[in-house]
Image: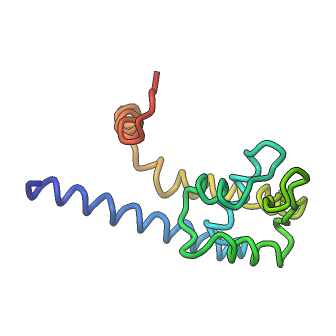
Amino acid sequence: MNTEEVKIWKMYLRAHAALMREMDGGLQRAHGISLTWIDVLVQLSLAEGQRLTHTRLSERMLVSGGGGITRLVDRMAKVGLVTRRASRKDRRVSYVVLTDEGKKKLDEVTPTQFSQVHDQFIRHLGAEEMPVIRDFLARLLGEDVS
């Protein structure tokens, strides 16, 4: 990689880290909840039956928890945002399930999170840049944008 390519890569890494720190800090200050916890709540809210196995939850998460999913779920269950339920079909399988309290917390934090995404990211994009960024990110992810 040439010097310019390395600079761009480093800028991307710094920008991502800065955005995640800023969003996490803002959510902690406003709602007392981390971006990682919100990611768990979002993933469960989008899942069929608002439940996922620990493995599937871990695979779907967008934000790194910095530790094991079991410990993360333990902490969230302790404050009532999620619960565990055993599978009726296979006793070896348990699900992480979104609770009513977890739904309420997600509803509470969503406006703040959307505001942060706008203020820290979207407002910096010009209208002509949005399709370019979307197409670039889709290529990175191997997704079709049509």
Q: Quadrant of residue 143?
A: top left
In this rendering, position of residue 100 left or right of residue 71? right
Q: Quadrant of residue 131?
A: top left
Q: Quadrant of residue 63?
A: bottom right
Task: Evaluate whether residue 132 shows in this view.
Answer: yes
Residue 31 lies, in percent from the top left, at 72, 71
Residue 146 lies, in percent from the top left, at 46, 21
Report the front residue among 41 and 121. Answer: 41
Residue drawn at (80%, 61%) of the image: 94
In this rendering, position of residue 15 left or right of residue 23? left
- The number of callouts visible is 0
Q: State the residue lying farthest toward the left.
A: 2
Residue drawn at (40%, 36%) of the image: 142
Residue 8 lies, in percent from the top left, at 22, 55
Report the front residue among 125 and 97. Answer: 97
Q: How is the image coloured?
A: rainbow
Task: Evaluate whether residue 127 shows in this view.
Answer: no
Residue drawn at (65%, 69%) of the image: 69
Residue drawn at (8%, 54%) of the image: 2
Report the front residue among 110 and 48. Answer: 48
Q: Which image quarter holds the N terminus?
A: bottom left
Q: State the residue lying farthest toward the top.
A: 146
In this rendering, position of residue 89 left or right of residue 58? right
